Amino acid sequence: MYKTELHCHSKHVSVCAHASHDEIVAKYVDAGYATIVSTEHINPWTFPRELEASTWRARLDYFMDAYRDFCRAAEGKLNVLLGAEIRFMRGNDSDYLVYGLTEDFLYELGDPRYINSIHTLAKLVREHGMMIYQAHPFRPGMTVTDPRILDGIEVANRSPWHESHNDIAAMWAKANGMHGISGTDFHDPEHVPLGGIITDEPISSSDELLDVLRSDRYTLI
């Protein structure tokens, strides 16, 4: 049995997080995980002021340098896959988890915060074979998204600092025939890994993750 975390943030990109990559790796190894999807925020607060005044290439380099550092910290201990949690600059204060991301896709897409439309973002993501889920859709302040344009929603968000109304999310997913996922929403060194999925086979690449998610070959942690 293999455990995969689907929602994790570090202090190296997500300004709301306080854990280093080394701290995260140690936590998840101790908790018996095999894989982590790095879902750093790409939201209005992600990038330092000097990067906001620069190019998308510079901002993406900042994002990807942190991902590569995460991979180095985890080498030989855990698999680390590239994902993101995206929020737009205006018009929608909800958060969307994207799986199967590549640096090339992000570069060609441009800064996704300025798309300002979940319909457009979801269409682009899915046209490129990736998957998009709404994170904690029933947390206060979120707007529940049309289920027809998503691959699923987070039905079990394990953050101890927010009320995500997981019971309502699970009922919504069932009523609309949506895939449900679980995530720790890891942010801090004292945070205990309690979310993600369990699979019979290891997940060591984004293609393997997408295959497992599409086929529902997993159980929720």
Image: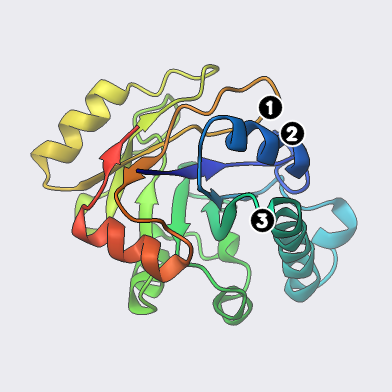
In the rendering, at what x and y percent does residue 63 appear? 72, 60
Residue 130, labelled with which disc? none
Quarter assignment of residue 211 = bottom left
Badge 2 amino acid: Ala
Closer to us: 135 or 198: 198
Badge 1 amino acid: Asp
Q: Mark 2 points at which residue?
A: 19
Callout 1: helix, strand or loop? loop
Q: Name the residue under label 3.
A: 76
On screen, residue 180 above or below 186: below
Sort mark 2 into few (<14), some (14-19) or many (20+) by Cα contacts within 10 Å. many
Between tags 1 and 3, which lies in front? 3
| Residues marked 1 and 2 touching at CB (< 8 Å) | yes
Sort mark 3 into few (<14), some (14-19) or many (20+) by Cα contacts within 10 Å. few
Q: Which residue is drawn at 39% across and 58% down?
A: 118
On screen, residue 86 above or below 7: below
Closer to us: 128 or 205: 205
In the rendering, at what x and y percent does residue 14 appear? 70, 43
Q: Earlier in the sequence, mark 1 or mark 2?
A: 2
Q: Name the residue under label 1.
A: 188
Q: Is residue 173 left or right of residue 154?
A: left
